[in-house]
Amino acid sequence: MSTDLLLALVVFAFVTSITPGPNNFMLLASGVNFGFRRTIPHMLGIGGGFLSLLLGVGFGLGALLTAYPSLHLALKLAGGAYLLYLAWRIAMSRSLSEKDGKAARPMTFLEAAAFQWVNPKAWVMAVTAMAVYADPAAPFLSVLVVALAFALVNLPSVSTWAGFGMALRGFLADPVRLKWFNIAMGVALAVSLWPMLR
């Protein structure tokens, strides 16, 4: 891969990882409700799950979805339904986790990793990255390079959203502000689904 193409890949990975979408809205809400430290497994799960999705798409899963559009549609519908469920849970949250005990908890590593496989934005990112940046002349190596570029860029990008949420915790300690913040995050998460399901 040429230096120019590698730079373009890193920029693509950064822009798609840091812009608003389901993962980043959930991390912002998790940073507010659970703090940065308790959100780390969620962040790592996003990175690990997306890495596995990239490798899957790069090594043939993308072609399978192209060959079977009904499978692609089923994946979109399942992902959309789960995303709406998560949006509802966030919107209905009413207090910071330390006050709730067992009532609320952040997403685990495995939950966040599994979510990448039904996250419409993650699929769009993975398919686009592999279609544009993987080299058919060197498929194995180029798929690994694309996956590595995303792995290096993803964690710092998503950490920004969780950190911003952590910074808002003091302001949102007021139950009324927190209620409206969580409702806004739930609505934003649901709305983020629209461009990806068209």
Image (cartoon, helix red, strand yellow):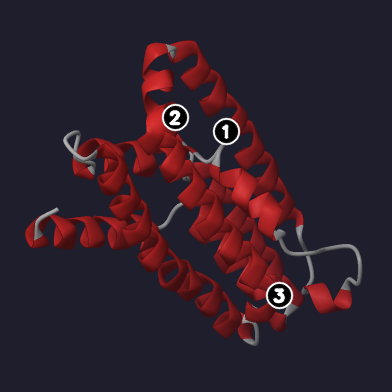
Going from N to C along the chain, the mark reached first, 3 or 2, is 3
Going from N to C along the chain, the mark reached first, 3 or 1, is 3
Classed neighbour count for the residue bearing mark 2: other residues with Cα under 10 Å, few (<14), some (14–19), many (≥20): few
Q: Nearer the viewer, residue 89 or 121?
A: 121
Measured from the top left, where is residue 80 in percent x and y? Answer: 57, 33
- How far is the residue under mark 3 from the one under mark 1? 26 Å
Residue placed farthest to the right in the image?
Answer: 102
Position of 41 with respect to 18 (left or right) is right
Identify the residue under disc 3: 38
Identify the residue under disc 1: 80
Residue 197 is labelled as: 2
SS of the residue under disc 3: helix
> Decide: marks 3, 1 in contact (CB < 8 A)?
no
- How far is the residue under mark 3 from the one under mark 2? 31 Å
The residue located at (21%, 40%) in the rendering is: 138
Classed neighbour count for the residue bearing mark 3: other residues with Cα under 10 Å, few (<14), some (14–19), many (≥20): some
The image shows residue 163, relative to residue 88, as above or below, that is below
Kind of residue sitting beneath label 2: Leu
> Decide: marks 2, 1 in contact (CB < 8 A)?
yes
Measured from the top left, where is residue 143 in percent x and y? Answer: 31, 45
Kind of residue sitting beneath label 1: Gly
Measured from the top left, where is residue 126 in percent x and y? Answer: 37, 42
The residue located at (46%, 68%) in the rendering is: 155
Kind of residue sitting beneath label 3: Arg
